[in-house]
Image (tube, rainbow, N blue to C red):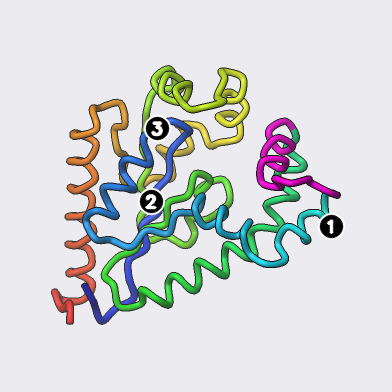
Amino acid sequence: MTGGAPPLVVGLTGGIGAGKSTCSRTIADAGIPVFDCDAEVAGIYRTTGFVADIEAEFGALGADPKRAMAARVMTDDTALDRLYGVIEPRLKARWGAFLERHAGWPAVVVDAPLLLEKGWDAECDIVVCVMTDRPERLRRTLSRPGMTPERFGRVDARQAGDDVRRAKADVLIDGNQPPAEVRRQVLAVLGGVARIYDARTGGRRT
C-alpha cells in the first residue's frame, strides 16, 4: 500500500479500559502501520544507556527498573513528569523514524494513551477517541493482574476527561459495544480515512 502524498496521521486514544487495544489490533489486522506508544516505551527501556539515564535522575532502581519506576510514578505525579521528560526525546525520535519508514503509505496510526494530555494530537490529521462509560472501564480493568480500584482511579485521574475527548476528537468510537461492533466501527473509520486520502491525492495510490 503506497501513495504519492505524505500519509494521513490518525491518532487513537481512550481512557484506561476503554477498548483501545481492540481498536488498535483491528487497525493492524487491516494492514495499517500502528505506532504503539506503550510498546515503544517498553523498547526504550531495553536500549543501551536508558536505565543509566533514569537512574541519574532518580537514583538506583534495582534489578527491575521498569517495575520500580512504575511503582514510583503511580503515586507521584512529579516523578511521572520527570520520567516522561527522559522518555519523550527517545519516543519522538522513534516516531520520526516510523514516519520515514512509512512515508509512502496512505495512512498510519499513533496509538497513545496520553495522546491529548501530552500534545501528540498536534501530530495528527484525525483524532479518534474510544469512549466507554467509567463503570465498564473499571470492570474491564479489574480483570488485569495487579489492578485495584485505587490504581484504576489514579490512572484515570491523570487522563483527559470525556468532555475533553469529545471536544478534541474528530471521530468517536463507542467502546461500550461488544468487540465485533467496535471492530465494525473501526473499519468504518478506516474507510473514511481512505476516502479522505483519495480526495487529497485525486485517487492516486501509486
Q: Quadrant of residue 2?
A: bottom left
Q: Secondary structure at mark 1?
A: helix
Q: Left of 22 or right of it: where is 17?
A: right
Q: Quadrant of residue 20?
A: top left
**Residue 127, numbered label:** 2
In this rendering, which labeled residue sits more in front, label 2 or label 3?
Answer: 3
Q: Residues within 10 Å of mark 1 (few under 14, many from 20)?
A: few
Quarter that holds the C terminus: bottom left
Q: Is residue 30 above or below residue 185?
A: below
Q: Which residues are magenta?
A: 59-75
Q: Secondary structure at mark 3?
A: loop
Q: Secondary structure at mark 2?
A: strand
Quarter that holds the N terminus: bottom left
Residue 3 picture location, percent across and down: 24, 77
Single out the residue that lies furthest toward the left: 203
Q: Residue at x 57, y 20 (%)?
A: 148
98 within the magenta span: no
Residue holding disc 1: 56
Residue type beneath disc 2: Val
Q: Quadrant of residue 33?
A: bottom left
Q: Left of 164 or right of it: where is 128?
A: left
Nearest to N terminus: mark 2 or mark 3? 3
Q: Residue at x 53, y 45 (%)?
A: 114
Residue holding disc 3: 18
Residue type beneath disc 3: Ala
Residue 57 picture location, percent across and down: 83, 54
Nearest to N terminus: mark 2 or mark 1? 1
